[in-house]
Image: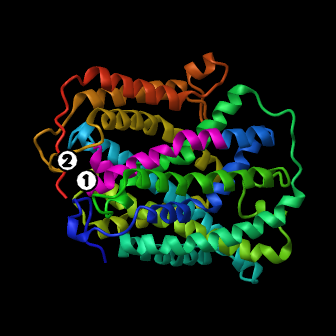
């Protein structure tokens, strides 16, 4: 079991190659969630060509962030949210790390809910009545299985995701062959520009933007001399390719099945009867794979938030919280709406954080003083904190989600520019306020 948390990984414990990041991110992102995001775009009213355009544009804009945050792992040996201390201060970054933890817990709970629904559907097909007691047992068994890989640690997660990748590629390829002949594409019509911007925002927030705070968590064990181009490229491609392909497949499925946004009771109706059980098993395993990455990183984020817990203890605590949320959600009929609202609100903190993080990286030339990240010498850096707050206000005013439309979005006819304004305002204000020369130190191997 890995004992190390966010403390820097020493040179003698480094291992792996940059291309390992490709399998990590492919195994993580090649899941049912990704497929469902594509179906949601059609539900927005987009035509199929519009949906494909939103998928490509949104992922091209968002997944470079995963590549960028992966660069700091080999350089500093620590997690991404710990690297954020360079901009926000060792204590100032705690609030952002806590937001990152909430981000992960939300996705973990969403995955656990779908795992439970898929398992209950399989039991029903086997003739087992799904009473409240059965639901509780399913949730607890799923939690016990989910705990294993994140608890063991980094090496187990990296190896398992590599094997998951090949299995998922094969099964999703079969699914694509089955569904494609049924697809009826709509080359004309579709949604207006404002709705298109909402779709792009959804693609970005559900993809590279939400995975960005995890980049360094998995690259920190790579040797410090690893090729930066390789680290960036493999991390970017590992997430970008599955998201584009599976979201496009999801959009195509949605042209066949109106309720394709429900991955358990709706989407399987597009499949032949013999493939429904393999599909449900595929759904369960891919969700376990996604949650493995989320759960491992959420423990690191909790440490970065200043909570004095061992990494393994933090993982167990996170899972307990997810079990509670899962039970409430399984007994509720509003899971899909809750998930869409959660994804929409992620933008408010993530976009400004990305703006500050990227700006700070540019100012430092990508080189950090690892010791300063764990020093109490500079607890708060107010330029970044002020820029983050301003960016969050602007993002909230310009968002157009299922929950509400901000006044800026309303003024623009419903166009959702929250990601772009939140990122640009926070990044620009941070650059304007923080005029001190950055003392860049080479990090010891």
Q: Which mark is residue 373?
A: 2
Specify the label residue 435 is tagged with. none
| Image position, residue 130 (x, y; %) | 68, 75
Residue 323 shows up from this direction: no
Residue under pointer 1: 76
**Comparing marks 1 and 2, which lies closer to the viewer?**
1
Start and end of the magenta stretch? 56-84
Measured Cα–Cα span from mark 1 to mark 2: 9 Å
Q: Is residue 266 above or below residue 434?
A: below
Is there CB contact under 8 Å for labels 1 and 2? yes
Q: Residue at x 49, y 41 (%)?
A: 346
| Place of residue 54 in the rendered image (x, y in percent of width and height, measured from the top left) | 67, 39
Q: Position of residue 302 (x, y in %)?
A: 32, 56
- The answer to whether residue 413 of the structure is visible from this angle is yes
- Residue occupying the far left of the picture: 377
Label 1 crowd (10 A; few <14 / some 14-19 / many >=20): many
- Helix, strand or loop under label 1: helix
Left of 384 or right of it: where is 42?
Answer: right
Residue placed at 73% from the left, 67% from the top?
Answer: 173
Circle 2 SS class: helix
Q: Which residue is at a point 56% across and 72% down the rendered structure image?
A: 164
Q: Callout 2: few (<14), some (14-19), or many (20+) C-alpha neighbours within 10 Å? A: many
């Amino acid at each position: 079991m890995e004992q190390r948390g966010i403390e820097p990984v020493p040179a003698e414990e480094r291992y792996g190659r940059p291309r390992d990041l490709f399998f990590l991110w492919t195994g993580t992102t090649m899941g049912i969630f990704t497929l469902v995001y594509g179906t949601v775009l059609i539900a927005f009213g987009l035509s199929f060509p519009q949906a494909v355009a939103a998928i490509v544009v949104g992922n091209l804009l968002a997944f470079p962030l995963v590549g960028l945050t992966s660069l700091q792992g080999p350089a500093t040996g620590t997690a991404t949210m710990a690297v954020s201390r360079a901009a926000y201060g060792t204590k100032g970054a705690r609030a952002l790390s806590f937001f990152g933890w909430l981000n992960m817990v939300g996705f973990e709970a969403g995955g656990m809910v779908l795992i439970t629904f898929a398992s209950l559907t399989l039991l029903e097909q086997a003739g087992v009545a799904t009473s409240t007691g059965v639901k509780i047992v399913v949730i607890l068994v799923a939690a016990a299985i989910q705990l294993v890989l994140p608890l063991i640690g980094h090496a187990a997660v990296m190896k398992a995701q590599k094997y998951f990748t090949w299995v998922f590629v094969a099964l999703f390829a079969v699914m694509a062959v089955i569904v494609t002949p049924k697809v009826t594409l709509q080359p004309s019509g579709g949604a207006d520009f404002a709705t298109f911007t909402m779709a792009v925002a959804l693609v970005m927030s559900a993809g590279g933007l939400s995975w960005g705070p995890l980049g360094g968590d998995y690259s920190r064990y790579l040797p410090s001399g690893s090729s930066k181009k390789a680290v960036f490229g493999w991390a970017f491609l590992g997430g970008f390719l599955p998201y584009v392909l599976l979201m496009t497949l999801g959009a195509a499925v949605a042209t066949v099945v109106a309720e394709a946004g429900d991955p358990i009771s709706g989407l399987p109706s597009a499949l032949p009867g013999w493939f429904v059980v393999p599909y449900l098993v595929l759904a369960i395993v891919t969700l376990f794979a996604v949650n493995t990455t989320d759960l491992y990183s959420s423990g690191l984020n909790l440490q970065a938030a200043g909570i004095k817990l061992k990494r393994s203890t933090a993982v167990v605590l996170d899972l307990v919280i997810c079990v509670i949320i899962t039970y409430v959600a399984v007994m509720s009929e509003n899971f899909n709406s809750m998930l869409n609202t959660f994804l929409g609100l992620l933008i408010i903190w993530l976009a400004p954080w990305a703006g500050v993080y990227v700006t700070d990286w540019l100012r430092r030339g990508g080189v950090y003083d690892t010791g300063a990240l764990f020093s109490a010498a500079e607890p708060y850096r107010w330029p970044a904190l002020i820029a983050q707050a301003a960016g969050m206000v602007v993002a909230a005013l310009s968002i157009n989600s299922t929950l509400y439309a901000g006044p800026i979005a309303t003024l623009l006819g419903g166009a959702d520019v929250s990601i772009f304004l939140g990122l640009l305002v926070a990044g620009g204000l941070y650059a304007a306020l923080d005029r001190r020369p950055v003392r860049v130190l080479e990090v010891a191997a």
